[in-house]
Image (spheres, coloured by chain):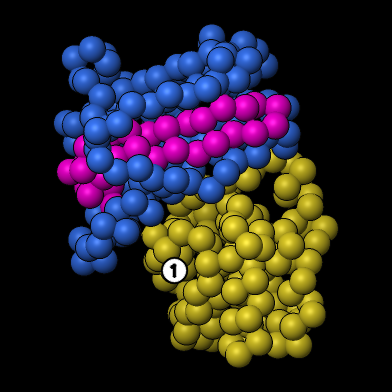
Chain colours: A blue, B yellow
Amino acid sequence: MNAEPTTAAHPRPESWLPILELSAQEVFEIMLGCQVEPVKEEENPRNTEFTAMVGLAGALCGILTVCCGSEVAGKIATRMLGPEIASSEGQVWDALGEICNMIAGNFKNKLAGMDGRCMLSVPTVVTGGEYSFHSLADGDSMSTVLLFEGQPVTVRLELHS
Amino acid sequence: MSKIRALIVDDSSVMRKIVERSLRQAGIDLEKVVEASNGAEAIGALRDNPVDLVLCDINMPVMDGLEFVRQVGTVENAKGVPIVMITTEGSESHVVQALSSGARGYIRKPFTPDQVKEHVLPVLEKKS
């Protein structure tokens, strides 16, 4: 289902939010077998118990994060692995990190002319909601909240200018 | 098709399990699955475990998938073993690098079991 690159028609970061949303929706549909739809952020406050992050370097520089509650993270791992396998906390971190990695990869692959000049870091997952996030990215940022089994998953991209 | 011994190389254990499941869903009869979390580990695993197929990520710590493909020919057990890359790195340049280094196929993440079947079965048929 991977859609063709669309940045020829959307060359500026301000118009990349639909591409980010599509990238996340495809990952959830293909890897978890479920549809997720963007919803209003103010009605679905961000839950940061689990934060997965992947850095982008090169032509596109910044960080992509996926934030959700622990229950959602567990459900994502169960969807990916099946209930009999997704048992440990480590597998939940791993699953969320891979979701973040695939969204980042899918996003950059949709940016025509960008994919070969942008590299991804391996994912990192932070657990525990008692922290503040201070990205040093000084450029555009965009975020979307997707409802997964009725609970919010926030996908955020912060870019260096 | 006879039973297949596969090596799955990915730094994510979750992804290794998903790849294994996708191979089974593709109808591939797996006799044995060996796992490695980076290219260096995979080189070591190949010395002790001859396999019929390798599925390999690109972005991994220690040794990435492209370097693994370049070095795999140094392992006596692994000469001629088909390697299919399975990665988030979907750029044309990565595909060209992987294929010119010796990989036989390329699957972009996210992927469906059907895509695994579509890319892996021809490689195995060509080998046999």
Q: Which residue is mark 1?
A: B20
How far across and how far down the image is residue A70, in percent? 21, 43
Helix, strand or loop under label 1: helix
Residue that appears at 24% across and 34% down: A129
Where is A112 relative to A85, above or below? above
Q: Nearer the viewer, residue A97 or A25?
A: A97
Whether A65 is among the magenta residues is: yes
Give the x, y percent position of residue B27. Answer: 44, 71
Q: Please say if A119 is above or below A75.
A: above
Q: Amino acid at mark 1?
A: Glu
Task: Tell me which residue sits at (48%, 46%) in the image.
Answer: A123
Left or right, B76 with respect to A144, comes to right
Q: Position of residue B100 (x, y in %)?
A: 82, 58
Quadrant in the picture for residue A118: top right
B31 over A23 or under it: above or below: below
| Classed neighbour count for the residue bearing mark 1: other residues with Cα under 10 Å, few (<14), some (14–19), many (≥20) | many
Q: Is residue A142 left or right of residue B36?
A: left
Quadrant of the snapshot with the C terminus of chain A? top right
Q: Is residue A121 left or right of residue B127?
A: left
Read off the magenta span: A50-77
Q: Is residue A89 above or below residue B91?
A: below
Q: Is residue A96 left or right of residue B62?
A: left
Q: Residue at x 67, y 16 (%)?
A: A8
Residue at x 38% of width, y 54% of height: A94
Q: How many marks?
A: 1
Tell me where residue A48 appears, x and y as whole percent: 27, 32
